[in-house]
Every structure is written in structure tokens, then in C-alpha cells.
Amino acid sequence: MVSYLVLAKIIDQELFQEYLKGHLPTIAAYGGSVVFRSIANQTLLGTDNWDAIAIQQWPDSTSFERWWHSEEYRPWAGIRDKAARITIISMAGAEELHAFTDA
């Protein structure tokens, strides 16, 4: 399992909502899922303030890459680039927190 942290600075709210509705089914079609999202964010430390944050989970990085370069996602990528400034961080080494707190 691999996770991706998705950070968005929204440029066009209406277009961003269209992007969300349209691209989410393509994630599921390639085996991924959105396991967390937040639209009420406040930066406490640092200089970036993200309007939307999400975590996607994928069976493996190959599944993510297949989706990212797919014909189904391609039109949504163009809308994404007009709707928001996006940063995506691969979290391949992420572990669940309880793994560190179990004694």
C-alpha cells in the first residue's frame, strides 16, 4: 500500500468542484481511494496555506502511475491545472501511528 498527500491552493472554486466530481471515479477505477480530505485548514507553522488537503491510498505506486497517465484522467488533469495549484507527496514509507504507540 502506498499513500499520496495531495495539497491544493484553489484558484477557481467552481472549476475545482467540477474537477473533484469528475476525477474521483477515475481513482476508484484504477484501484485507488481517497481516505482523508479536509477543506477547513489553518497553517500553524510554515508559510503555505492549503485550501484543500487529501490523502489517496493505492495498492502500489504502479497503480498510481497507471491512473496518473491514463486516458480517463487526462482531461481532468487539464481542469486541475486551471482550478488549483497542486502539490503531491508520495508517502511510500508511511506507517499507521498505532504501530509506534503499541508497547
Image: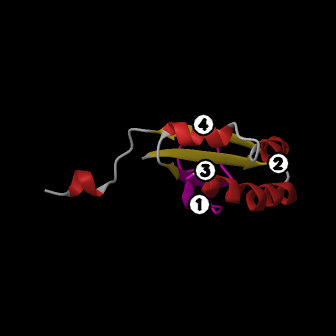
Q: Position of residue 59 (x, y in %)?
A: 47, 47
Identify the residue under disc 4.
65
Q: Is residue 54 rendered to the left or right of residue 91?
A: right
Type of amino acid at the residue the image marks with label 3: Tyr
Type of amino acid at the residue the image marks with label 2: Ala
For the point 34% across and 47% down, which residue is it? 95
**Label 4 crowd bin: few (<14), some (14–19), many (20+), radius 10 Å:** few
Identify the residue under disc 3.
30
Q: Is residue 8 magenta?
A: no
Closest to the camera, between mark 1 and mark 4, is 4
Identify the residue under disc 1.
37
Nearer the N terminus, badge 4 or badge 3? 3
Nearer the N terminus, badge 2 or badge 4? 4
- Asked whether residue 6 is in view, the answer is yes
Q: Position of residue 80 (x, y in %)?
A: 78, 46
Type of amino acid at the residue the image marks with label 1: Arg
Q: Check whether the beta carbons of the residues at disc 2 and disc 4 lie within 8 A of each other.
A: no
Q: Nearer the viewer, residue 46 or 29?
A: 29
Callout 3 secondary element: loop
* CA–CA distance in space, label 2 to label 3: 23 Å
Q: Position of residue 8 (x, y in %)?
A: 69, 47
Q: Is residue 57 rendered to the left or right of residue 101?
A: right
Magenta range is 31-56
* CA–CA distance in space, label 2 to label 4: 22 Å
Q: Is residue 45 above or below residue 16?
A: above
Identify the residue under disc 2.
83
For the point 64% across and 63% down, which residue is it? 40
Type of amino acid at the residue the image marks with label 4: Glu
Q: Is residue 51 magenta?
A: yes
